[in-house]
Amino acid sequence: MGKLVIVKVGTSSITKGDGSLDLDAMRVLTDQIAEAIKRGHQIILVTSGAIGSGIAELGIKPNPNDIVFKQACAAVGQAILMEHYRQLFRRHRLKVAQVLLTKEDLANRVSYVHTCNVLDRLLSLNVVPIINENDVTSVDEIMPVMKGYKVNFSDNDILSVLIANAVQADLVVILSNVDGLYDGNPSRKKGARVIPIVERITPELKEAAEGKSALGRGGMKTKLEAAEIAMQSGIPLVIANSRRENVLIDILEGKQVGTYFKPLGGRIPSIKSWIAYGAGSKGQIKVNEGAKQAILRGASLLAVGIESVSGQFKIGDVVSIVGPDDKEFAR
């Protein structure tokens, strides 16, 4: 039986050193996706590469702090990116659809549901949805980290898992320029090896995950964050090297490739995964220790357990529940 698979490809996997698109790499990727579809799988492609492609097209060296220029590059590069994907998939008689999203699109319940419905319809029409972060409007994603801004989708790693939750995908495959998760930083630890299976993400694993590519905005740390969400949501996730021959097909055939992150339990309903990871919190309720323990046991929150309330929210809004230590433990 075919699977619904989210395939995320990073900037480093489809671009050259100058940011221009690596058409040979894109051809290999699209050939494998087409073969997977031919075998009965449904594929949603989450792609990066718009900003780098735009920079290469304009031929102007970017100022790291010039956010508007990067947004302009994204607008230029996205058109180039989609045109090449369209031509490459056309060779296999497959049509493509561009879907640009922001964190706000997925945080809003109405737009979230609309997104799910459109993706479902595209798949039923045998169209390959190609998703990317809308860098033109979502400036938080491309703000320099040194300025203290929070990165939203981290080169689309988080986005790919949020989409997987939205459409109830069977698998997430993150293709990058690394062979998988190593037991130490390969550039610092001689003889570091790829971990074939991860059943739990420990602080040690997070500490070992460092570094990112020059053109990409993500890194192994953000991939671990994405994997952790997937595992908690009951979705298996694989991190593998996009340059490995037949990588996607081998993964779909169940072969040991890269690092496999095993789900912690059964699937979480879409509405719960949206509340946990996709929705924006409209307020905060602080509770005492007794109320916290009751909630963790599955009981309802009673007024007597509430210590304080902040924010403005109405019925149906998502709120954050924090304990005496001010740390969120529920929503």
Image: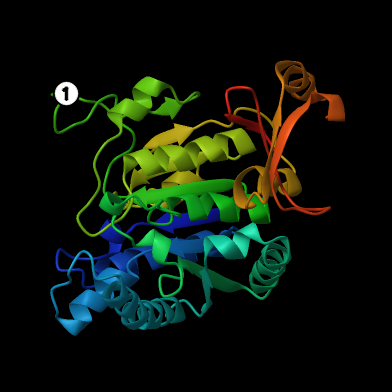
Q: In this view, does 117 lie above or below 316?
A: below
Image location (x, y in percent) of residue 294? 79, 19
Please tell me which residue lies in front, 323 or 95. Answer: 323
Image location (x, y in percent) of residue 89? 44, 76
Q: In this view, does 250 lie above or below 27?
A: above
Q: Residues within 10 Å of mark 1 (few under 14, many from 20)?
A: few
Q: In this view, does 180 lie to the left or right of 109?
A: left
Q: Residue at x 55, y 39 (%)?
A: 229
Please tell me which residue lies in front, 310 or 81. Answer: 310
Image location (x, y in percent) of residue 282? 67, 51
Pick the quarter of the image with the C terminus: top right
Q: Residue at x 45, y 34 (%)?
A: 260
Please tell me which residue lies in front, 258 or 219. Answer: 219
Picture quadrant where residue 79 is located: bottom left
What amino acid is at disc 1?
Answer: Gly
Please tell me which residue lies in front, 224 or 253. Answer: 224
> Would you say residue 236 is visible in this rendering?
no
Q: Is residue 250 left or right of residue 164?
A: left
Q: In this view, does 209 lie to the left or right of 85?
A: left
Report which residue position mark 1 lands on: 191
Q: In this view, does 22 lie above or below 326?
A: below
Picture quadrant where residue 77 is located: bottom left
Picture quadrant where residue 138 is located: bottom left
Determine whether the residue tagged by mark 1 lies in a helix, strand or loop. Answer: loop
Image location (x, y in percent) of residue 50? 34, 72
